[in-house]
Image (tube, rainbow, N blue to C red):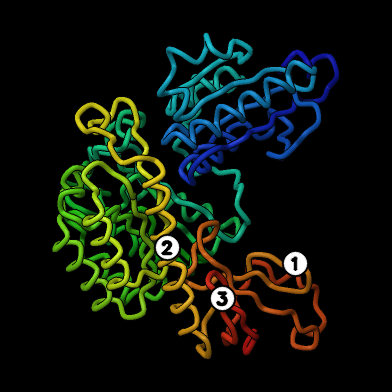
Amino acid sequence: MTMKEKMTGNPETLQVITMGCSKNKVDTEHILAQLEGRYEILPEDWAGKVDNLLINTCGFIGDAKEESIQAILAQVARKSEGEVGKILVFGCLSQRYMSDLPGLIPEVDAWYGARDFNPLLRALGVKDRSITASQRRLSTPSHYAYLKISEGCDRRCSYCAIPYIRGAHRSVPIEELVAEAEALAAKGVKELIVIAQDTTFYGLDLYRRRALAELLQKLSEVEGIEWIRIHYSYPADFPEDVLDQMAHNPKVCKYMDIPLQHIADVVLDNMHRHVNGAWTRELIRKMREKVPGVAIRTTMIVGHPGEGEEEFQELLDFVKEARFERLGAFTYSEEEGTWGAKHLEDNVPQEVKNDRLDRLMTLQGQISLECNLARVGSEIRVIVDDFSDGVFVCRSEFDSPEVDGEVLVRYEPELFCNADPYSFVGDFLKVRVTGADEYDLIAEVIEI
């Protein structure tokens, strides 16, 4: 019992702000599960007084680091005004700069690394409870959840600091993940989004084989789970039995998130991606062939050392050829401590990087529009994520939450027997696509 509880009978309040990726979101959910009942947990956007404030930071690239620093400074300002009691910071940024941050921002009460969960929990009064337990306090809508299947990364891409921050790859055993999926399904989760630094590396450390396909099969047997979506796949040594699961297991979404980063051989070599352009093209061909209708999402980096105008044009030509349904892109950011920062000259001017980014995304915008227009007239199954202004905000199996477009379906009261539209959030509908733009689809209900 805390001093406040002894004096007032009320638990202390706790707020957590999570920066960065979905993997950080899962870490926060596990931590909050250990703290339920000990604290009154406030919403992430809470602006009033709070006794304890945790910030889960991102330290991946420059923009993310700056965003995390600004979030910390904003909470320090709240603390100076008497709105916040203690500030505890953990995650990738504090892991990466543990020797510097305490001196730079002394107003923070304590700093913890990316995996210092037990010390953090002990500071909050929880004694050595397992952070890998299946309990989660979901921060997503209750019908979908992220499932982190491993931690760390054994890849050594020249531009990436994650292995230095998160350490070596460590898979979570299949039986633990199935137990977590069962616990999530019991809470009403219908869609699992499988995540890791590299999902296709899963199992090599535990089972001496790539076991993602086996894991997908086991997860699909969990009662209540209807969709399983894969994120963050690595192209080198891609396990093709995963494509068999996607093609033949009705619960595995025909959706592949595979960051390719580039296509030009010289750039891929400088990136230490362990593939070349020919391998990449063949892999995309196999995906299209083995999983007809698959939606492929990828990311690219422009302006990496070694990318001249010829290499960039090769990237544009490849994107035209591959016609990715989803594509995001970034300009190269030199990160201290990485192989690239030590051995490659960041010699592409920022204005050239920005121009190439604009050219690539303009091209992709047209491709995305054409892909969406091609779906007009098709009938698809969607899950309802939200209801707003008379419209159901939905997704198909080809759309991941937070990063992809939406399927917008107008609520027709007579079709739903005048039921409360919010009661359909988390339900599946069958719809017909009637319109499209670059990002979203418009559809009408044909079956409830």
- Left/right placement of residue 150 relative to residue 10 reads left
Pick whichever, 412 or 360, lies toward us.
360
Disc 2 secondary structure class? strand
In the figure, residue 109 lies in which quadrant? top right
Could you tell me residue 195's position as x and y percent? 40, 51
| Residue drawn where x is 61% and y is 15% of the image | 108
The amino acid type, in three-letter code, at marker 1 is Ser
Residue at 40 percent across and 48 percent down: it is 330
- Quadrant (top left, top right, bottom left, bottom right) of the N terminus: top right
Check disc 3 and report the residue beneath it: 437
User: Rounded to the nearest whole Å, what is the CA distance between mark 2 and mark 1?
Assistant: 25 Å
Looking at the image, is mark 2 or mark 3 nearer the viewer? 3
Identity of the amino acid at label 2? Answer: Arg
Residue 388, which numbered label? 1
Name the front one of labels 1 and 3.
3
Task: Examine the rendered structure and indicate whether residue 100 appears above or below residue 312.
Answer: above
**Residue 176 shows in the view:** no
Observer-nearest of 84 and 210: 84
Taking 36 as reference, is 107 above or below it?
above
- How far across and how far down the image is residue 250, in percent? 39, 76
Which residue corresponds to the image point at 60% horizontal and 29% vertical from the top-left? 70
Is disc 2 in contact with disc 3, using a CB cutoff of under 8 Å? no
The residue at which mark 2 appears reads as 229
Q: Residues within 10 Å of mark 1 (few under 14, many from 20)?
A: few
User: Dot 3, crowdedness within 10 Å: few (<14), some or many (≥20)?
Assistant: some
